[in-house]
Amino acid sequence: MKIKEKEFESLLQDLKSLANQMGATVRFERGDFKGGYCLLEDSKIVVINKLSNTQKKVMTLAAALNELGIDEIYMTPRLREIIEEMDENK
């Protein structure tokens, strides 16, 4: 699936909203790290490198959502397809 560059920003917001619905907090932090999903004292947190480009942020968040488990979550088929395609850990 081809995603246009201008779509990545709205896609990032959609994925962030989905993560929040799943009970995860999405944080954008500066540093020398890739980013991803972690548990911190029973809190689900997705940390994304603030310095990454938007496409990389979407890829990191998609991978984290896959790790959280999207099978039982309702979302549009297009969003599900994008998450599965953008998950770089497949």
Image (cartoon, rainbow, N blue to C red):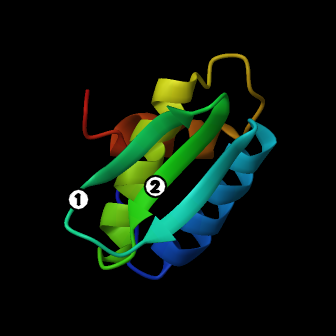
Query: In the image, which disc is placed on residue 33?
Result: 1
> 7 or 48: nearer the eye?
48
Q: Residue at x 26, y 40 (%)?
A: 88
Give percent across and percent down for residue 19: 67, 45
> 30 or 20: nearer the eye?
30
Circle count: 2
Query: In the image, which disc is placed on residue 65?
Result: none
Q: Quadrant of residue 71?
A: top right
Give percent across and percent down for residue 64: 46, 39
64 vs 73: above or below: below
Asked if the residues shown at circle 1 and circle 2 are in contact, with their CB atoms under 8 angstroms apart, the answer is yes
Q: Quadrant of residue 41?
A: top right
Q: CA distance from mark 1 to mark 2?
A: 9 Å
70 vs 77: above or below: above
Query: In the image, which disc is placed on residue 47?
Result: 2
Secondary structure of the residue carrying tag 1 is loop
Give percent across and percent down for residue 49: 35, 67
Residue 77 located left or right of residue 5? right
* Residue 1 seen: no
